[in-house]
Amino acid sequence: MIPDNETSAILNDIFHGYDKRVLPFVQGPVLVNMTIVLGILIELKENQQLAAYVISHTQRWYDNRLIWDPSKYRGQREVIVPQNMVWIPKLFVYNSLESKDMLTENRADVRLYHNGRIKINIPQYVQAICRIQTQAFPFDCQFCAVALASPLLNVEEMIVNATQPPRDSYFTGNAEWFLFNVTVRHMTFEEEGESRVEIHYIFHLQRRPIYYITVIVAPTFLISALSILGIFSPGSNDGPRNEKVSLGLGSLLAMTVLLGIVAGAMPKSNDIPLLGYYILVVIVLCAVAVGISMAFLAVSRHYIQKEQMPSKRLLRFMFLNEYRKRRSTVFRGVHNYRFSQECDDLMYSKVPEIQSICMMMEEIADSHRSMRRKADMKANKKLIEREWARVFARFDYFFLVVFETLNLSALAVFLRVAWLPTPELRDQIL
């Protein structure tokens, strides 16, 4: 009886006496050609140093027991059968915490060719270990590998020929990572004196830094720039300078919070990320600026309380005009002296009313002189404050330019890393 379906006839003939438990080699090891054709990055957890992918790789090998003559079956050259009907090369992902096939053995199929060649496509979900290098964060490039190896077969029983992905392969990252290349590395390792096959699918990942630039870098730069501008803006007295110190301390607190956000996103290691260095540099700049402002406050209070004017040498050094000391008006003019002499002469008069009037006028003159003395002291204090304010204003302008330049330089050095070439693939990935 001849079956109506040629596929059924082929399967009945080639699987008669076939044992899938036996390796399909005759005069040498089984040669398995494999490569990856699909790679989708699902998630990369920096803190846990884990990467999750959906991958699909093809395997091709020959089984001489599954050969037929197409001319005997109306020219049919290939058939598709369930995976559990044939011998399958067993490779496991040994650097994964979780790995599962997306198709069960009953649902997965293999393609058989008339010359004994077999092809299988294996889609898998893999959560593998990825050693994160954070030195260039957020402009970092990571190399994460999915490592496959045979659990038992050595190179004398099975040889795996790993090839690079074909051009029509599909690889993509996620919202944070750009997957720009996938390479395949063929390796061997020794275990108990036996050489075994090891295949690495290496994913080249480039971080998309726009989120960190807009959320962390830009606010940090603006806070530091405005903080330095507020700290070194010239003031006329001590009140604004006290507010400047408070402004600087508030800015330090805000940048410390941003540094905590960066620390929470990175693995706990000895390597400080580039963004962490940038925030630390900005924090140091603001801290030094606050310290200088506090020193200015202490020095100005010291000289003002001592009522000491800036020296002429200091004024010339700061390119400031010398001040002119105003003469006191408490005892100005000869009229006051003559009036006092006349009152003294009238004090000896025998008319009591004249004596009383002279005493009242003397009291009024003393009160007037006291008020003028206080006014002169107040004016002198304001003059001292104004002169020291002129001096410290020049210092403020100088340090404002210096610190804003340093702040811009720190930002330029930080952003320069974004234009550095992509690092070369490391020899040691796992």
Image (cartoon, helix red, strand yellow):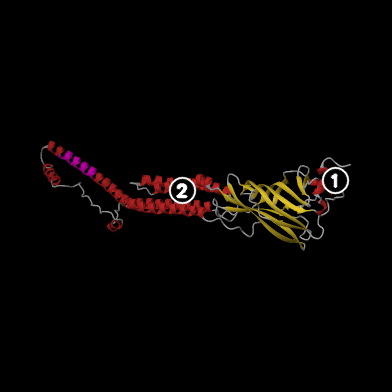
Q: Residues within 10 Å of mark 2 (few under 14, many from 20)?
A: some
Image quarter hosting the N terminus: top right
Q: Position of residue 387 (x, y in %)?
A: 29, 51
Q: CA distance from mark 1 to mark 2?
A: 74 Å
At 24% from the left and 42% from the top, the residue drawn is 371
Q: Is-magenta flag for residue 300?
A: no
Q: Residue 253, can we see it?
A: no
Most foreground residue, 305 or 239: 239
Q: Position of residue 87 (x, y in %)?
A: 80, 51
Kindly report the secondary structure that dominates the magenta region of the rendered protein. Answer: helix
Above or below: residue 383 compared with residue 4: below
Image quarter hosting the C terminus: bottom right
Q: Is residue 334 left or right of residue 72?
A: left
Most foreground residue, 114 or 323: 114
1 or 2: tag closer to the N-terminus? 1
**What residue is disc 1 on?**
12
Q: Residues within 10 Å of mark 1 (few under 14, many from 20)?
A: few
**What residue is disc 2 on?**
221
Q: What amino acid type should be assigned to the residue bearing mark 1? A: Asn
Q: Which corner quadrant of the image does residue 345 belong to?
A: top left
Above or below: residue 62 compared with residue 105: below
Q: Is residue 265 left or right of residue 108?
A: left
Q: Which corner quadrant of the image does residue 322 belong to?
A: bottom left
Q: Position of residue 420 (x, y in %)?
A: 52, 56
